């Protein structure tokens, strides 16, 4: 069972601020979804390798050459706030 | 026949014979949008000036006698999770309400290079999370066959736009069925190509190991042309498959003699609407008459696909969506105390309920103490599901099933029960976990609503799916059925 405290902890990890109503809702719903997920425990997966990715790709390398890049004005065009060529944020510490 | 009931290949013939211009086709699309968009609401952004300028360029090329491709001048709608330089791209999320990408997704760039005309960006479930387009942060989209019903999702806007004649073809993305299920609900052809077949560069990520871009079309011939345009290796996507794709139109063969088709019994189980099953059985009968060898088979781990999918997809989503923090683009709340306060409040205001639910679930299953029991277990089950398919394809060329357990449901019918909504995707999810291609093709109506038939194939065997679908289409009237908007 997931408790409301678990939901609060996960929300903090996910950087989400939930109101009381959302905490109740997600506690209830996550329990229901995880109940369904517990069906997986019925399966014996000893010795079964995990599939994180379906293609037999390992590392994809390219030549270490300078390619095209987005110029700073374009890269900053969506910035909510900026100073010179930097993204500006509220104080960190 | 109304111009916008025509397929892309029919319009192409008219274009090269100079019976019509690209500008006239574009104008007809916008007349249609003015007529029906109030009712259907397929689009989030309409790009009329852009489209008109593009159509004029195509007309100049044709007038100058330059060769043009089979989709030149064809109006295409694009799901709003593909980046388009200079054109707002929102993923139907308030957190990206003002985002204007500095670059264009490869799939869209390839359509531009083929002289296609993008007419607008379509509505979707926020960040492609949903099965009805009701999770859009902006508005609902209505099914053109019955405006009180959903178009399916998450690519509901792209499916509805083609069904309603607001575009001739469109692009969607499919992580657990988000192209095939809306294609089924809206009575059009939709395909999820093999994972890696179409570049994901510029596709806003939901679950990176499952996401794949694919087309919606009115018929199978248009589907082959669309695949020719969008498939191909892209160095900008490290998961793009470096394979030589065939000319997909070579598979438009009206003959399936000797093709072996398996029908997994788990896909015809009790949860499937009996009337949907009837249509599927009629299609099976037709395919048998046409010379295919069809028999029942089993994919024994099918029941585990849904829980495995929701653990894997949400885990990947919780990581992918960490980037929306109000720093570089999108929504940022005012007057934050500090940077963490800004992250938390921007994300909480910007994301909708379903997106938060999936981020929460994914964060939980990846968190300390639960990783092995949930996420890792799901990845192992994914292997078993993939092995089911590998085994089946030793015996069969194609697997066949319903695309969705039901026809389009009513708006609001399922929004309060996420589990019931997730069950919408039982027939489509296993395909994404295995990375294989699948398409949905209309196979008749139940109570005036379209039913979709799903064909699944081996990795990179899109051609075989096209051949079976084309043969079914040429010997039935199913893909020629069109809705009367608001008049049914």
Image (cartoon, coloured by chain):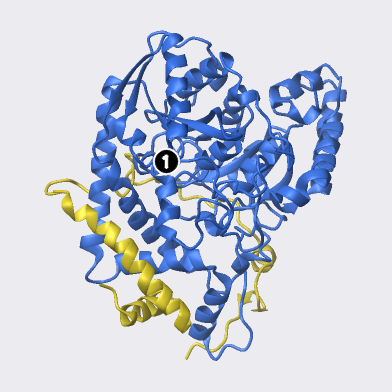
Q: Classify the position of the C terminus of chain B by image quarter.
A: top right
Q: What residue is shown at x 73% (from left), y 21% (from top)?
A: B10
Q: Is residue B91 above or below residue B104?
A: below
Q: How many marks?
A: 1
Q: Is residue B278 visible?
A: yes
The tint chain A carries is: yellow
Q: Picture coordinates of residue B51 (x, y %)?
A: 79, 43
Q: Residue at x 77, y 51 (%)?
A: B38
Indicate whether B476 appears above or below B175. above
Q: Percent position (x, y) of residue B297?
A: 27, 26
Q: Residue beneath label 1, please?
A: B428
Which of the image's four quarters has the N terminus of chain B? Answer: top right
Q: Quadrant of residue A20?
A: bottom left
For disc 1, the chain is: B
Local crowd size for mark 1, using a 10 Å CA cut-off: few (<14), some (14–19), many (≥20): many
Left or right? Give the position of B481 relative to B372.
Answer: right
On screen, residue B213 versus residue A31, left or right, reads: right
Q: Which chain is blue?
A: B
Residue at point 71%, 33% (across, down): B168
């Amino acid at each position: 069972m997931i408790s409301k405290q678990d939901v609060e902890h996960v929300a903090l990890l996910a950087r989400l601020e939930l109101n009381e109503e959302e905490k109740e809702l997600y506690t209830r719903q996550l329990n229901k979804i995880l109940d369904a997920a517990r069906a997986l425990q019925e399966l014996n997966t000893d010795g079964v390798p995990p599939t994180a990715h379906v293609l037999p790709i390992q590392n994809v390398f390219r030549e270490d050459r300078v390619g095209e890049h987005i110029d700073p004005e374009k890269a900053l065009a969506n910035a909510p706030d900026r100073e010179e060529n930097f993204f500006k944020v509220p104080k960190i510490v | 026949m109304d111009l916008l009931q025509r397929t892309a290949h029919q319009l192409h013939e008219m274009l090269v014979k100079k019976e019509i211009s690209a500008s006239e086709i574009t104008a007809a699309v916008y007349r249609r949008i003015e007529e029906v968009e109030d009712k259907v609401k397929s689009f989030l952004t309409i790009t009329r000036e852009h489209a008109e300028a593009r159509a004029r360029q195509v007309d100049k090329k044709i007038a100058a006698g330059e060769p043009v491709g089979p989709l030149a001048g064809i109006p295409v709608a694009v799901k709003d999770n593909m980046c388009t330089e200079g054109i707002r791209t929102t993923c139907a999320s308030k957190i990206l309400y003002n985002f204007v990408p500095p670059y264009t997704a490869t799939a869209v760039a390839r359509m531009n290079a083929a002289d296609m005309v993008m007419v607008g960006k379509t509505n979707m479930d926020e960040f492609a999370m949903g099965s009805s387009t009701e999770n859009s942060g902006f508005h609902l989209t209505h099914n053109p066959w019955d405006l009180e019903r959903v178009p399916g999702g998450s690519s509901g806007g792209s499916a509805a736009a083609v069904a309603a004649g607001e575009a001739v073809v469109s692009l969607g993305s499919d992580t657990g069925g988000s192209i095939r299920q809306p294609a089924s609900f809206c009575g059009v052809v939709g395909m999820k190509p093999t994972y890696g077949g179409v570049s994901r560069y510029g596709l806003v990520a939901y679950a990176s190991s499952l996401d794949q871009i694919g087309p919606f079309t009115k018929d199978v011939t248009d589907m082959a042309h669309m695949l020719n345009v969008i498939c191909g290796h892209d160095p900008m996507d490290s998961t793009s498959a470096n394979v030589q794709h065939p000319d997909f139109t070579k598979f438009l063969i009206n003959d399936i003699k000797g093709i072996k088709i398996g029908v997994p019994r788990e896909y015809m189980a009790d949860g499937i609407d009996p009337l949907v099953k009837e249509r599927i059985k009629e299609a099976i009968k037709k395919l048998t008459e046409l010379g295919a060898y069809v028999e029942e088979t089993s994919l024994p781990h099918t029941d585990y696909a849904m829980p495995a999918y929701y653990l894997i997809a949400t885990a990947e989503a919780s990581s992918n969506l960490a980037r929306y923090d109000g720093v570089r683009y999108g929504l940022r709340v005012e007057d934050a105390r500090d940077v963490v306060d800004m992250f938390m409040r921007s994300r909480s205001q910007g994301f909708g309920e379903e997106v938060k639910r999936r981020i929460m679930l994914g964060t939980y299953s990846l968190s300390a103490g639960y990783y092995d029991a949930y996420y890792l277990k799901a990845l192992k089950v994914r292997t078993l599901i993939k092995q089911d398919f590998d085994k089946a394809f030793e015996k069969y060329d194609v697997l066949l099933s319903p695309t969705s357990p039901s026809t389009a449901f009513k708006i609001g019918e399922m929004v309060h029960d996420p589990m019931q909504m997730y069950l919408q995707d039982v027939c489509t999810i296993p395909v994404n976990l295995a990375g294989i291609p699948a398409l949905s093709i209309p196979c008749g109506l139940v109570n005036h609503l379209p039913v979709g038939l799903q064909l699944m194939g081996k990795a990179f065997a899109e051609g075989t799916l096209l051949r079976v679908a084309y043969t079914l289409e040429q010997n039935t009237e199913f893909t020629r059925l069109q809705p009367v908007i608001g008049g049914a």
